[in-house]
Image: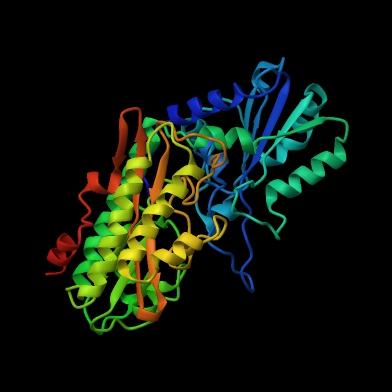
């Protein structure tokens, strides 16, 4: 792995918290992600299943974790299955975990080869009453591909139809939305890497530069500093592209007088940062660009005040919408009289600020967690990313920071890292 080793205590504690939530006499099973085919004999870049990593720290394909805390057989309470390597695999693919290495990384004492799993699984299924299976229940995910965990669930239920099957996803969501001290340190590292990439890119921004040239600077900074790479496909959007929310072509040339929207993040040890900044291509915002920029910054500052323990997501988004509406009226793109007539289900500000303000951040950029009926709590990390997009003017402004909620307010991780956001500081950086 490019990143430095992580103390196995993190994963040991994560397993303890997870198994404490299981029903009596339960077996829980987690699979590594698939190696996904691309074309010909090529494969897409592989990334570990976030839940499996959270519980083991194992960053290798063809891995299975079984947890059976009430098992009467002591050496079957925690089992990790890993890929059996060979001289041929080592020649073509390189080193794979030895059993001793897997034990050190995960803190799991009983390691087996994956081809040893069938009889052990059969034994544990005979003794278990409840089986917790892991599926992707991220609010934003609609699957068309039958991924590895899902295929495993179908086979398991077909072979053992009389068991009581339970969902691991709600338990994992409640655990992963609260970050431990070690996880916060890893996310802080990802924020630092994003900061370094931002400063590196800012030095290169000027009329005539291509968006993809800035992407090259970004990935150079990541890989040089042990990051896995991008947290997600970066958005490097100049001019009219700044109004395209998920623009990732990054193939336009920067023009004098335009703004450049940079939405990007680093992944370090599977943990992510997520930041958005806007730069004036020629080094100075026009009066109108500055007006819109400061409107978005005002929205973010007000939103950050509400990202505190005890508040709820839905009321929070409604209040942010009210602030956005006020700013859009000041910008002259909404009229007060029209706002007074608007439907509560279709507020007018959504034409210019059409996405949510915050999402959970962690092992996934859009991390799992309970958004509905759940209060913000200490240990959560959420983004704060309001935006205003005026397509007819070719101005798209989005400003995004990562916010750690504590018992005594919140901590802006970007502010803590010294990443500028005030318009005057952005222009000074450009100079």
Residue 225 x %, y %? 29, 54
What is the quadrant of the C terminus in the image?
bottom left
Residue 330 x %, y %? 30, 65
Left or right of residue 37, residue 117 in this image? right
Looking at the image, is 307 positioned above or below residue 216? above
Q: Residue at x 35, y 65 (%)?
A: 329
Residue 411 x %, y %? 29, 39
* Foreground pick, 356 / 62: 356
Q: Quadrant of residue 160?
A: top right
* Foreground pick, 209 / 243: 243
Looking at the image, is 296 positioned above or below residue 271? below
The answer to whether any part of residue 127 appears in the image is: yes
Structure colour scheme: rainbow
Q: How many marks?
A: 0
Q: Residue at x 29, y 44 (%)?
A: 413
Looking at the image, is 152 positioned above or below residue 395? above
Residue 355 x %, y %? 48, 59
Left or right of residue 294, residue 144 in this image? right
Left or right of residue 329, residue 146 in this image? right
The answer to whether any part of residue 270 appears in the image is: no
Q: Quadrant of residue 362?
A: top left
């Amino acid at each position: 792995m490019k990143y430095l080793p992580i103390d196995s205590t993190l994963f040991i504690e994560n397993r303890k918290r997870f198994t404490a939530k299981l029903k009596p006499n339960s077996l829980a099973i987690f699979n590594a992600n698939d190696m996904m085919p691309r074309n010909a004999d090529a494969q897409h870049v592989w990334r570990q299943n976030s839940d499996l990593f959270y519980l083991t720290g194992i960053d290798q394909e063809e891995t299975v974790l079984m947890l059976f805390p009430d098992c009467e057989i002591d050496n079957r309470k925690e089992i990790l299955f890993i890929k059996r390597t060979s001289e041929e695999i080592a020649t073509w693919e390189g080193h794979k975990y030895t059993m001793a290495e897997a034990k050190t990384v995960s803190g799991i004492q009983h390691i087996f080869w994956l081809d040893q799993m069938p009889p052990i699984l059969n034994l544990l299924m005979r003794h278990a009453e409840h089986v917790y299976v892991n599926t992707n229940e991220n609010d934003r995910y609609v699957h068309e591909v039958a991924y590895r965990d899902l295929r495993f669930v179908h086979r398991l239920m077909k072979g053992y139809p009389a068991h009581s099957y339970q969902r691991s996803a709600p338990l994992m969501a409640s655990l992963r939305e609260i970050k431990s001290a070690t996880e916060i340190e890893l996310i802080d590292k990802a924020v630092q890497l994003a900061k370094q990439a931002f400063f590196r890119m800012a030095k290169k921004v000027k009329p005539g530069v291509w968006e993809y040239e800035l992407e090259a600077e970004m990935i150079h900074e990541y890989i040089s500093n042990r990051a896995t790479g991008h947290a997600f496909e970066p958005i490097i959007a100049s001019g009219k592209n700044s109004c395209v929310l998920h623009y990732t072509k990054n193939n336009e040339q920067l023009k004098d007088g335009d703004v450049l929207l940079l939405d990007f993040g680093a992944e370090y040890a599977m943990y992510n940062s997520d930041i958005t900044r806007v730069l004036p291509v020629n080094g100075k915002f026009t009066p109108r660009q500055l007006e819109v920029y400061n409107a978005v910054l005002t929205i973010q500052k007000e939103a950050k005040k509400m990202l505190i323990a005890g508040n709820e997501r839905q009321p929070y988004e409604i209040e942010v919408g009210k602030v956005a509406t006020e700013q859009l009226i000041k910008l002259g793109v909404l009229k007060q009289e029209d706002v007074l007539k608007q439907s509560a289900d279709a507020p007018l500000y959504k034409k210019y600020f059409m996405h949510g303000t915050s999402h959970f951040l962690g092992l996934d950029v859009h991390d799992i967690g309970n958004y509905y009926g759940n209060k913000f709590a200490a240990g959560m990390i959420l983004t704060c990313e309001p935006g205003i997009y005026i397509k007819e003017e070719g101005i798209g402004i989005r400003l995004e920071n990562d916010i750690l909620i504590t018992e005594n307010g919140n901590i802006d991780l970007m502010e803590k890292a010294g990443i500028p956001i005030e318009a005057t500081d952005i222009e000074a950086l450009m100079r």
